[in-house]
Image (spheres, coloured by chain):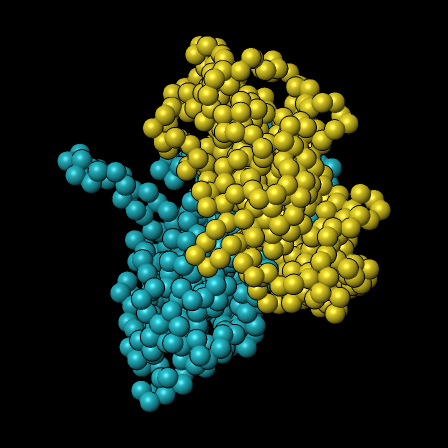
Chain colours: A cyan, B yellow
Amino acid sequence: MTAADGADQASALLAARGVTVSFPVGSQLAARLRHEERLLRAVDGVDLEVGRGEALALVGESGSGKSTLALALSGLRPADKGKVMLNGKTLPARRSNADRRRVQIVFQDPYSSLNPRMTVGGMLRELLRVHQVVPRNQVAEESKRLLTLVGLPAEAVSAYPRQFSGGQRQRVAIARALALRPDVLIADEPVSALDVSVQATILNLLDSLRSELGLSLLLISHNLAVVRHLCDRVAVMYLGRIVEVAPTEELFGTPRHPYTRGLLAAIPRLVHDASSAGAPAIAGDPPSPLRIPAGCRFRTRCPMAQQRCAEEDPVLAGAAQAPGHLAACHFAFASAPPAASGLARTADQS
Amino acid sequence: MTAAEGPVPAGPGPAGPAAAGPGPAGPVLDVRDLHVRIASRMGTVRAVDGVSFDVAAGEALGLVGESGSGKSMTLRAVLGVLPAEARVTAGEILLDGVNLVTRTQSELNRIRGPKLAMIFQEPMSALNPVMRVGRQIAEGPQVHLGFSRARAAERALELMRRVGIPDPERRFRAYPHEFSGGMRQRVMIAIALSCDPEIILCDEPTTALDVTIQDQILRLLARLCRESGVSLVFVTHDLPVVAQICQRVAVMYGGQLVERGAVGDVLLDPRHPYTRGLVRSAPDFDYVRDSLVPIPGAPPSLITPPPGCRFHPRCEFAEEDCRVSETPLRMLPGGRATACLHWERCLEAAAADRAQA
């Protein structure tokens, strides 16, 4: 059983199959002399599918490989192993312009992702011309249409990024992504840099664009409240692997992986119960991706780790009783999961 | 906090619960009608405009608002680390009944050093990158409490254990870059605790952290508060975080306090339209709405703030009187206060919001 069972095979628009992305670290010369290379495996054999018109969330701690996976899916960084498929077709490492248009990405920080020396109109016109989205004589009109689409005045074409607030800049970034009429929009923490009252406008915009344009959305976020508000399905990443994927309410209602349970328990709540006085939901820091634990990679922080977890790497698999729900834990679908074992490192419980 | 001259007679014993303040009656920190002005090319910025609040011993007060609301400036004024262009133009900051505003710098260092501590959002820029972590924790007790180098080091080790840094003997000699974000924040907390302060000012201490690490740090802070009776002022824009750690909350808008009260009351039953707007615009994990309701418009200019209530241009309940009359905080029953002239209407609207849920 693979992650392909998670979404309907026929409706998968963008898919990752065994995608692995590594970064060389340390001195490359020393590595070559010693005939060995130190690789940081940021994404480690990930299978994931984004359905047509679906909003999929990718959640996890920093360093879990969420953003690297997004770069691989968008083609900004080629995968070392595995393949990215769009509409059932495997995309080459160097994508053609036509393929590149299909998957667009919006980054977290609208202050650094926009060229400060280019007007908004200039950015949009460049894209529209290079990719020949519309005939040349309609480029100016199309730029204005895009700005209206994201809720900016059409006069904004002649303005520079510095003249906008953070929320407006993020709208410009979204307009730029939409200029190429993509099928999939990847949003990497699109509201983390914005004030609370402004976040709402951007989240509402993403939601309405999705329903109006039939866009598929891959939302990367650490804010589970945002995810619950916006997404149909959630994939949880930990140290380069997807450890659980399920429809949103199913995942938040009956989480199967102990890491997901810990993440949920760690969310600050407006109304919180008395249990918040106890031990933290998940103890310790995630291990370095350079020293991934053998066996299950979560076992060093897992409250119910067993001997088996140190020996056997669990695969992402489902069970008959929960269709569309996959989890990479030996005990995910067991009738009686083992109790807290104390095998996990408990050095810094506070 | 490490900037200080002259040792001070040793404070309360290192471990053990410190009896804070002049008995349970008086507040540890009492800020009265604080005004901070910043000179800029465009004109004078009224960054903090008549803010009053107090913090009791062992209490955690949340100071909530968006960027530019004046919450960080308020905190900096209390600590006495305002930027060069800014100064306190009116009001009092009473720490154990002593007004900090009228003191000279060296007097301030002596009074404030051991009593006040601060935790910043970015531990990496607040810690000294070329000084061993243990020595940074030991510095405060050496300077303010007159500890010997060896005794201060012992104290640092004990603090590192208390804030949950594993293997403190080895980590004592490490540098900040060798720590993860969460561990660095624990180091900051250990430094803040090193002189047994009465109050710790926290400026978004968990905003840069992952949710799992944030959870660890919040629980640690809550536990330390319980154990040692230290008070917290917690600045953040994250309402659920405030709900988690604070007992009382003060909401700031445009340099002024607009609402104050017990955390549960204010966040679930807001009596100022801005508070209601904040609550309705943030997605809530436990309550998924069809769509989020943003606050229309933009925050006011603090150089030429709108007359009357500063929120009136964005407020759906605004009447003629809101545009004209000043709106000081008015006391309501139940220890609450609001600056809204028409808070009953906001109350009704908030009740209707809940009924829809």
Residue A40 appears left or right of B324: left
State whether residue B48 appears in this view: yes
State whether residue B71 appears in this view: no
**How far across and down, in percent of the image, does residue B136 sit?**
43, 24
**How far across and down, in percent of the image, does residue A253 sit?**
66, 52
Counting labels gives 0
Tell me the residue at 47%/24% (across/down): B4
Residue B107 versus residue A91: which sits nearer the camera? B107
Tell me the residue at 38%/76% (across/down): A158
Residue A58 versus residue A137: which sits nearer the camera? A137
Tell me the residue at 63%/31% (across/down): B99
Q: Is residue B58 above or below residue B327?
A: above
Residue occupying the far left of the picture:
A33
Residue occupying the far bottom of the picture:
A137
Residue A12 versus residue B84: which sits nearer the camera? B84
The quarter of the rendered structure image containing the C terminus of chain A is top right
Residue B5 versus residue B219: which sits nearer the camera? B5
Residue B254 appears left or right of B128: right
Residue A44 appears left or right of B163: left
**How far across and down, in percent of the image, does residue A209 sit?**
53, 73
Q: Is residue B161 above or below residue B308?
A: above
- Picture quadrant where residue A239 is located: top left
Q: Is residue B157 above or below residue B72?
A: above
**How far across and down, in percent of the image, does residue A344 sit?**
53, 29
Tell me the residue at 56%/12% (across/down): B10
